[in-house]
Structure formats: structure tokens, C-alpha cells
Image (cartoon, coloured by chain):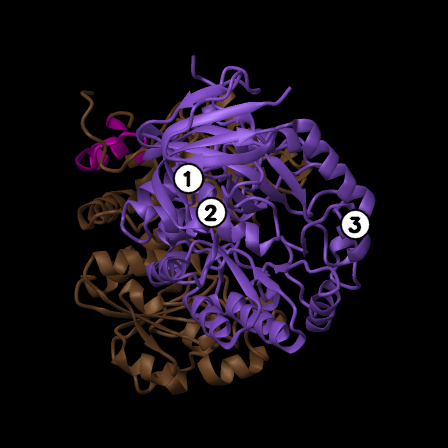
Amino acid sequence: MTPTPAALGKDLVGLQYLSADQLRTILDTAEPFKEISERRIKKVPVLRGKTIVNLFFEASTRTRISFEFAEKRLSADTVNIVAAGSSISKGETLVDTARNLEAMRIDMVVMRHPASGAAQFLADRIPSNVVNAGDGRHEHPTQGLLDLLTIRDRMGRVEGLKVCIVGDILHSRVARSNIYGLLTLGAEVAVCGPPTLMPPAVQELGVQVFTRVEEAIEWSDVLNVLRLQLERMEAGYVPSLREYNRIWGVSNARLEAAKKDLLVLHPGPMNRGVEIDSDVADGPRSVILDQVTNGVAVRMAVLYLLAGGQPERAEAAKQGGGDA
Amino acid sequence: MSRSLLLRGGRVVDPSQKLDAKRDVLLVDGKVATVRAKLDAPENARVVECAGLVVTPGLIDVHVHLREPGEEHKETIATGAAAAAAGGFTAVCAMPNTDPPIDDPAAVGFVAAEGRRAGSARVYPVGCISAGRDGKRLALIGEMVEAGAVAVTDDGNPVMDSGLMRTALEYALAFGIPVADHPEDLGLSLTGHMNEGIVATRLGLPGKPNAAEDIHIVRDLLLAELTGGHIHLQHVSTRFGVESIRQAKARGVHVTAEATPHHLVLTHDAVIGYRTDAKMNPPLRAAEDMAAVRAGLADGTLDSVATDHAPHHYDEKEAAFAEAPNGIVGLETALGIMLTRVVGEGVIDLPTLVERMSCAPARAFNLPGGTLAEGSPADVTVFDPKETWVVDPRAFLSKSRNTPFTGWELTGRPKLTVVAGRIVFGDDEARPRRRRGER
């Protein structure tokens, strides 16, 4: 295969610096990969012979498993490293961890890390492709992409939609990746939540700010409801989870004022009865499980493109027609 | 036999005597002997031609971290003093946040003795305000002053207890020394890693708001007013902080204050890309704050330039942003940065620069020097205002390399540093002989 310019760079660190074309390329590439997960034998040889390390410095179930399925369904060899019990918890620095992995001749690293900027740090120091699976409060680009894909699937477009992200924006990498991706693709974006959980100068990101969730619901075509972590209450950002639910919780009663085809997304894991009521999560507006399904396809697309795969060959590649 | 050094034909800028003219400067036996238009060299005098160069009272940095004792892998008193001399500084004040902290007369004596032993720029010890730097009760301030401490501070930490700060300001009156404070309300800033604002929001880093600094600046000014004590505010970085000091000075409060070169030329945009060499405390702030610090330097609200030279080992800065320590080295870039980006951009003129880097710091900390008046110590800085050079941290005499100015092209470079009549930098006979990397 003749080398052609990669659709993405070496790494996927965030959505902030991706162009609309790059975002669309990833989403378009994800489409043909969706079908693989519906087959009886869910495996294609696209990444055969590639070694991928899933390096998780923070607990994660959904994202790690989603990446692992994406990798395995593309026939990559994968190793999972979790921080607890590894040399990482014995005080090894991120630089040394990276160098050691590199010395084992790997091809890609999928990393989650509690420090903002950790993905860029790693990407700058190793020649392998780095995929950010969440770094601190900075970005969670594959979550942003799967949200975009889910919205596009259901609404037929992203451009011109009004999307509001509700909840703890301050600590949320999901919110930042969503904001960048949605704005680049031409959506209008708003955020809503307690003022204590709003990042300073957030409107300078180009988003509208709602304090009252009722106003946000009336305005929106899409609600992306974020998890409220118990630690936020313990740290005093909100006085109690019950109060949070009463004032910012997304309930069917509140959704009566919403547009008829309003979509509800949630990146999981949900706190039922806190940020989202069960009747909403399990109701007709919810696309929460579609997000999970799309997550695998989007991650396959990202891995394929970073490995040098051509977007237009994705269909052929998955038929077994060639490696990436 | 008398030791004489004649600096011939330089542009002598000495604001303490309102002097800015071509002069010869004769130094004899560690003192300034004569400054005149034309001097004959005494017999046996060493003559250094200074035509085209600027000759000033020795630069003084009242805020450096030399890391000894305890963190000698970052810097030692000897390497720090050599870095100071290479940067054109003839004296530095060593902060006491070492391990153990400089909180008793023996520790003060150690710093002073090591400074003398280094035989380079003068090293003045600064003692802690509180014993153990724990912010609870006064350290042995009187005994530390007897041992050579020129000021007290808990720098690195603010003094959170306003009652202790009041006590320190009152007690220090007995010794005529300034109480220096790193103004920061930790309740507002402890979890922060950079300036609070849009850049921090984009990077997903928790911020330190201006208010954290402003609250303590205002508190310190009120306590200085209450006690009549001398408060010295370190590395002022906020617009409200500058304005508060301006008003306090107008009211007659005994306050002196620092501006760092980095807060004069960089904003929080320098952090983009998670650059740990742009991480310091107080953090680089917004453009409006940088403008206010510049205005404060220009009108004398911020009377002294101080580098807050804070060496860290490269391993420590080679980390995720939140995990990297605060601080940058500054001694060997300060003069070039100030000449190029502050004087060069018309914020202040050259005599004002000398005032802010030599005369005012000497007055603030009651140090000898800051003048070339006859009979004063023969501490002199000579620099080439035209020489253009590129910052290469590998050439630093400091042990550390953590600077955001790597690769900057600067105009203006130290050529000769003289302490007590002896050349400590820029000369074959001086030790260390040359900058690393030069032939």
C-alpha cells in the first residue's frame, strides 16, 4: 500500500485541535465498523500484528472494556495495565513507564491518567501512537466522538442543533471534548449546572451558560447529562445529592416542557435518582445504550486511522482485504 | 599593597547620584575610590576598558532560592552565587525554605559562611518568620539578625495566621529589618496549579484566582499600617495587588514590593502545552495583570526587580503539569530579559532599571551597595547593552535549567561582575572562569 498522508496525526489527545473534516472522517469511518460487532464472528484482521497497551492509571470499566473490544475485534494484541499493583504504584514516573513500554516495541498506547496533560506528555515522548482515554479534567476525545456519532445517527446532523451539557462541567473532561467537537461541527452549545461546578470563564469557550435546568431543557435539542460524583458533595461543591436532584436532576416532569424529539445522553456510569431519574434513563428519549454501542465503533475507527488506515478503505479493510 | 581596578570609559549609570555619563571608575581596596570623567590609572592598577559598555552599581536580587542545605541536587550556595555573578548580580538574598529551614542563628551562620566561602556574589541570609516555617510561633528573629540575617520570611508558604503576621511586623521593628511575605490565601489557591481563567479551563487545570493573592496583600498592608512595621511584598502579580500597594504607599505605609522578570514579560498563555517551565507561584497571570505589573514597576509602586530564582532538577519538571514543582531559574536571564523586553519596549528607561535592580533593593533590605558613591563597597556590574545572545540553559552556571526563556534572543549581556573590588565574573582570573560552553 502506498503511504498517503494520515487522516489524523500520530496521536489522539483531544478534540480541541481537530478540524471539522477530521471529525467527520472519524465518524464516517466508524460507520462501516459498526457492523463488525453485529457479526457472529466479531473479528477482522485490520490491526493484525499490532501491539496495543491499555494503560489505566485511574479506575475505568466502560472505557477500558470498550477499547479492549475495539482492539480485539480488529485483531490487535493487547495488554492491560492498571495502576494498582503495577510498578506505577511503586513510584515509577510516567516517563519511565513510557520508556519501558517503548523498549518492549509496542505500537500504540491507550492511556487514562488523573493528571490533565498526561496524554500530551506521553505523546511528546514516545514514537508510538497515543490515544487519550481521559486525562484529568482535560479531554476524553473518544467519549466526545461517540456522543457526536450518537447525535448524528439519531438527528441526522450535528450542525445547527442545540446541545446542552448538564452537571459538573468543572471537573469534566467529557464536557470539554463535547464542547470542542460540537462547536467545530457547527452545533450551538450550552452548559448548565450549579455555579460552583462551572469552570471559570467558561463562556469564553463559546458556550451559553444556564443556571436553571428548566431553561436548559426548553432550549435544547439534545441534553447530555453528566454524572455527579459523590466526591463533589464531600468536597462541598453541592450541599447534598438530594438537593442536587431536586434542583438540577433531569426528570420526566421537567422534560414535559422539552421539544418532542429531545435526545438524552449520559456518558455513564449513571447515578439514578441524582442527575438523572430512572424514568428518563430508561425512557424513549434516552440513547444511553446506543452511546455504548457506538463507543466500540468509534474507537475502532480511531485505532484504524492512527495506524495509518485510509478512511475510504475502511469498508474493504474490514472484509479482510488488507491490513491498516 | 593596595588592590586597584580602573573601569575606564564606560557609560556610568548610577541613579543614587543621578549620574548617567561617560566616566572612569576607580576601585581601591574594596571600595569605590573615585568616579570621574578622566582618571589616570594608579601604579599597579588593573585597567579594564569599558568603552561601549554600561557600568552600574552592582545588581542586587533580594529573592533567590539557593536550595542549600537539603536540596543540593538543585543548587548549592556556591553554584547559586556563581550563577548570580554570571547574571551581573553582586548580591543575593537567600530564602530560608531549605531543609532544614533557616530558622535559627546557626543555620543563618551556615548560609553566610558558605556564601563567603563561595567567594562570588555576596550571599545574604534571610531567616524564617516562624520556627520550623510552620506558621505557628516566631523564630529566633533577634538572634538570626545578630548572625547576619537581613530579613525574615516564610516564603514558599504564606503566613496564614494574621495574628502571627502582626506579631512579626511588630517584633521586627526592634531590628529594623523587613518582614517579607509571599502573599497567598491558601484556602483559595491550595488546589490550583496555574492562574485561574480561560487558559486553565481549557487545559483542565485547577486555578489560583487573583483574589488569593489580593486578600493577603491587602491584609499585609493593613497590618503594616497597624504596626508601623516594614512589609516587603514578594513577587506581586495581580492588578488589584499593584493598585493596593500604590494606595498604601500614598498613605505612607512602610511597604516595599517586588516584580519578577517573568511576570513582566509572560502571561498564562505561556502554560499552553502544559509547559512545566512556565509553572511558578504566583502563577503567570492574564495580560491585564502583566500590564499592571509593568505600570507598577514604571511608577515605583513595585520598587524592586527580584527573580525568585527557583532551581529544580530536570527530573522534577519532567512530569505531568500538576505533579511538577513551582518555580523557574532567573539569575542568568534577568538582566537580558529586563533590557530587551522591559527597557527595550519602553516600560522604563535604563536609569530606572538600575534603580529597580540595584538602588531600591539595597534600600529595601538595608544592604550596603546600590551606589557608586565614593567610599561605598566596590560592587559593580558592567554589561554590554548591544550584545545579542540566545538563551541556552546548557550554558548556565546554575545547576538547574528550568527556564521558560530557552531560545529567546536577548540584547544586553553581563560582561563583568565586581564584588568588593574583585572580579568574580567575566575575567580570566575570576573563578568560575567563563560561562560553560564558551571557549
State which quarter of the image contains the N terminus of chain A. top left
Give the residue type at disc 3: Glu
Measure the C-alpha gap from mark 3 to mark 2.
26 Å
Q: Residue at x 56, y 72 (%)?
A: B253
**Which residue is tagged 2?**
B357
**Which residue is tagged 1?**
B335
Q: Earlier in the sequence, mark 2 or mark 1?
A: 1
Please give the letter of the chain rendered in purple. B
Please give the letter of the chain rendered in brown. A
Measure the C-alpha gap from mark 2 to mark 1.
9 Å
| Image position, residue B92 (x, y; %) | 59, 41
Q: Is residue A55 magenta?
A: no
In screen coordinates, is A289 left or right of A61? left
Judged from the image, the secondary structure of the residue bearing numbered disc 1 is helix
Q: How many marks?
A: 3
What span is colored magenta in the figure?
A306-321
* Circle 1 or circle 3, nearest the eye: 3
Judged from the image, the secondary structure of the residue bearing numbered disc 3 is helix
Q: Earlier in the sequence, mark 3 or mark 2?
A: 3
Q: Earlier in the sequence, mark 1 or mark 3?
A: 3
Q: Which mark is residue B146?
A: 3
Q: Residue at x 45, y 80 (%)?
A: A248
Judged from the image, the secondary structure of the residue bearing numbered disc 2 is helix
Is there CB contact under 8 Å for labels 3 and 2?
no
In screen coordinates, is A316 left or right of B301? left
